[in-house]
Amino acid sequence: MEIKWNYKNQDKIFDTIDGAGVPFLSFKALDETGMVTNGFSTRLGGASRGKFATMNFSYNRKDEPADVLENFTRMAKALNVDRDRMVVSYQTHTVNVRRVTEADEGKGVIRKRDYKDVDGLITDVPGLTLVTFYADCVPLYLVDPVHRAVGLSHSGWRGTVKRMGQVTLEAMEEAFGTKPEDVIAAIGPSICKDCFEVGEEVVKEFEAAFDESRHRELWSPGARPGKYQLDLWRANGIILREAGVKPENIHITNICTMCNSDYLFSHRRVGEERGNLAAFLCIR
Ligand SMILES: [Zn+2]
């Protein structure tokens, strides 16, 4: 299937790479560091069937485990990374960040995870591929070319309120000496402001979490009474900037999962009847 992305703007943020029949998105700015392999999966090129068709990476949604494993195998080949050295998060909308090492290789893919409640992964080990899951929530890719370290975090609205981007940068600073001003950051494919309608209770949390001067740019009244359109892309960009990442080093997706639900899983579009997308980040 040929992909015709429905972009939010004309910025050239991504390459769509055809990895031997497995298409995936790759941030140009992260590739240009020469240090990492980065990817974001689509629904295409996988082995899963029915509501999981075809590239589902979740073992926890009652998909056939053999199909999920085959999807990891195909994606690893497309990315040219080692499937058995992938390390997978255990996402529960926390801001817990795990430093992963060789001891974690294969966890969540070919071995059981011996941790839980981990929404962010960091490492400085080349060849390990960090993997996190999505279906509208926001992926944060962080690359520190100075200390040769990376982070990959899941930041839904709850993670955004708890400033997952900043928390992950702090974990990288503690573990590797990362300075935010050196970091190249990318905010990955996820739900856009036009698609993300929220209620008063969510807006109240953002009111408390962000300076008042930011409120007007973060949400606006929705079409329905008591509803708002919330901009998670901008919110995560603000968090990264306030944490010290240079504005020119923050690359924000122009592909929305819900606007592109032919190619991407979107929770808001189809609810629980779906598979999971995945983000991948590996130090070469
Ligand atoms: Zn959208």
Image: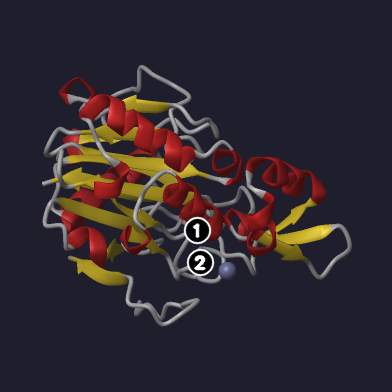
**Mark 2 vs mark 1: which is more N-terminal?**
1
The label shown at residue 89 is: none
Q: Which quadrant of the figure has residue 235?
A: bottom right
Q: Which quadrant of the figure has residue 209?
A: top right
Residue ID for mark 2: 256
Callout 2 secondary element: loop
In this image, 238 relative to 57: left or right? right
* Disc 2 residue type (three-letter): Cys
Against 260, residue 68 (above or below) is above
In this image, 124 relative to 41: left or right? left
Is disc 2 in contact with disc 1, using a CB cutoff of under 8 Å?
yes
Identify the residue at image location x=23%, y=58%. 30
Residue ID for mark 1: 190
Residue 105 visible in the shown view: yes
Ligand 1 within 8 Å of disc 1? The answer is: no
Q: Which quadrant of the figure has residue 153?
A: top left
Location of the N terminus (image quadrant): bottom left
Q: x%, y% of residue 158?
A: 60, 40
Q: Please tell me how crowded label 2 is: few (under 14), some (14-19), or many (20+) other residues with Cα within 10 Å.
A: many
* Disc 1 residue type (three-letter): Ser
